[in-house]
Amino acid sequence: MPLLYPNIVEATRHTVGSWLDKYISNEKAKLDIAAHVGYYGDDPYTLSMFYFGMAQAGFIGPGGHFVKGGSQQLSNHLAAYIEQQGGTVLLGKKAEKIITQNGRVTAVTFRDNFNDGIEPVTISCDNVVANCAIPLVPAMLEEPHATALQQQISSKTNSTSLLCLYLGFKTDVEKFGVKHYSNYILSDEVKTLKDVHPNQLDDWPKRSFIFVDYNKIDAELAPPPKSVGAICGVDHLKNWEGLSKEDYKAKKEEVAQILLDRLDKQFPGIRESVEYYEVATPKTNQRFTSNPSGSVYGYAQSKEQSGLKRFRNNFLIPNLYFASAWTFPGGGFNGAIMAGFLAALQMNRDKIWSACDEAKYVDQRIVPLLERKKIDDKTLELSFEKPAKFQHQKGQYAILNIMKPKITELDLPYRWLPVVSSPEEDSIRFRIELDGSSFSKSCELIDISEEAIIFGPMV
Ligand SMILES: Cc1cc2nc3c(=O)[nH]c(=O)nc-3n(C[C@H](O)[C@H](O)[C@H](O)COP(=O)(O)OP(=O)(O)OC[C@H]3O[C@@H](n4cnc5c(N)ncnc54)[C@H](O)[C@@H]3O)c2cc1C
């Protein structure tokens, strides 16, 4: 049978590097074409040409897109949709066990992320979608499924991680010569495509990076005339392991200064405009997503692990679906959303649904406001009913999340705050700085009996 799409078949057999070497001799042209490699991996000579070509065609054709207000808005929208359909979204809970019987999933056990005093809860279910990293799933499964999955994944390699320096500028940075949204700052060390990977492992004074100026698009991230930017580069968890708390902090600061210097060299004067910066390392990625090695794209998109070679849906147990960056088609928002969509299509085909259970899980962390008191011009005190089993010690913190914030402009509806009430009191009190943020304004406008979620306690 003749091949209908020989170019696509050929791409599946190539890495980006081997494909470019075959068709292009000019090294500068190869580097230009492969400038976005860091969006998908760390080595053009292992990254699948098929995967890179598909993703890059999207950039060149329909173009890239940005979620106004940042990616949290996307999560908020999806969560709101689930709740509108009668579902419940539980944050700050960790799935611990996927329970099986006769080769099928029957229930999931989860516990509170912060409060060990809250007993684990087991909820029975018709289907489970594991949308965390696949390498985390064997530890949640019973035998023989745990070993079966472990055997299937043991030879897989994880994708790279990233380091980001988030920047708040006093002004628009166009005046410093920033002309584009995405600016790839290629290291002087990189002369040929073969230099790209070694350079990704080099020290920060030499490693290539991308600088993004969010003011070039209608990003809704900062109030004018301020603007937001980010420096992002490939990084690996091993560069940040084994450090004491102080050394970790010091290394973050050292890398921030190196990158700020290099940015200033590229766009003279820009450094003066920086009024806030914060570094997120592969360790940060791992901590907040639980993705092993802080991987941001799931399993690496090598030619051995991309396209049809990726895991799909319910390959292990009929009613256990997998949908994340670690499955087909892969990482990034598009990839993860598509994986969820494919899992939903498959679930619709499988139709493993029983009547909806009317009994709803009661989230004990949701509590009403009891009292709102202005302490002075700059401080507001809110007093909530104490969540059941919330036992804090003096000096501990909690996250206060307003459920229906009245003002959300350029802000998120939660803060990490010290608990100011004593452990013996029946209520839980927080002091909020009236700093003009949407969060503080929402706190001023919150009505008595209105509900908030309190996550904690934590140090
Ligand atoms: C700095 C950075 C910049 C990026 N930029 C872009 C970009 O511009 N465009 C793009 O398309 N992609 C980007 N990505 C990649 C993109 O964010 C990811 O590929 C995508 O979010 C993967 O989605 P996911 O749903 O598979 O997993 P994740 O977003 O990693 O979410 C996994 C979730 O599972 C939760 N979880 C894990 N274990 C458990 C458990 N046991 N119980 C309960 N919950 C659990 C975690 O807490 C986490 O919330 C970026 C990533 C990073 C880190």
Image (tube, rainbow, N blue to C red):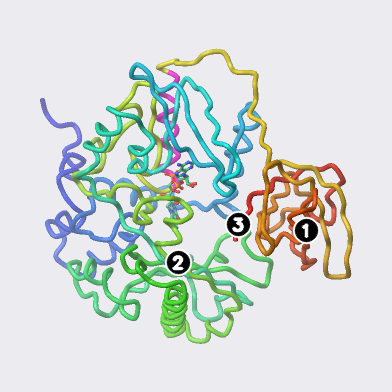
Is 46 on the left-hand or right-hand side of 317?
left
Q: Residue at x 62, y 61 (%)?
A: 221
C-alpha distance separating marks 2 and 3: 26 Å
Marks 3 and 2: in contact by CB < 8 Å? no
Q: Amino acid at mark 3?
A: Met
Q: Which residue is mark 3?
A: 458
Q: Amino acid at mark 1?
A: Ser
Q: Residue at x 63, y 51 (%)?
A: 456
C-alpha distance separating marks 1 and 2: 36 Å
Whether the magenta-drawn stretch holds residue 341 is answered as yes
Image coordinates for residue 448, horizontal then vertical, percent: 87, 46
Mark 3, Cα crowd under 10 Å, few <14 / some 14-19 / many 20+, is: some
Tell me which numbered mark, 1 or 2, is placed earlier along the sequence: 2
Q: Residue at x 30, y 59 (%)?
A: 37
Mark 1, Cα crowd under 10 Å, few <14 / some 14-19 / many 20+, is: some
Tell me which numbered mark, 3 or 1, is placed earlier along the sequence: 1
Q: Which residues are magenta?
A: 333-348
Q: Of 153 and 185, which appears nearest the observer?
A: 153
Is 440 rendered above or below residue 154? Answer: below
- Determine whether the beta carbon of the residue marked 1 sits less than 8 angstroms from the nearest atom of ligand 1: no
Image coordinates for residue 60, horizontal then vertical, percent: 37, 53
Say which element carries label 3: strand
Q: Which residue is mark 1?
A: 421
Say which element carries label 1: loop
Q: Which residue is mark 2?
A: 164
- Determine whether the beta carbon of the residue marked 2 sits less than 8 angstroms from the nearest atom of ligand 1: yes
Of badges 2 and 3, nearer the viewer stands 3
Say which element carries label 2: strand
Q: Amino acid at mark 2?
A: Cys
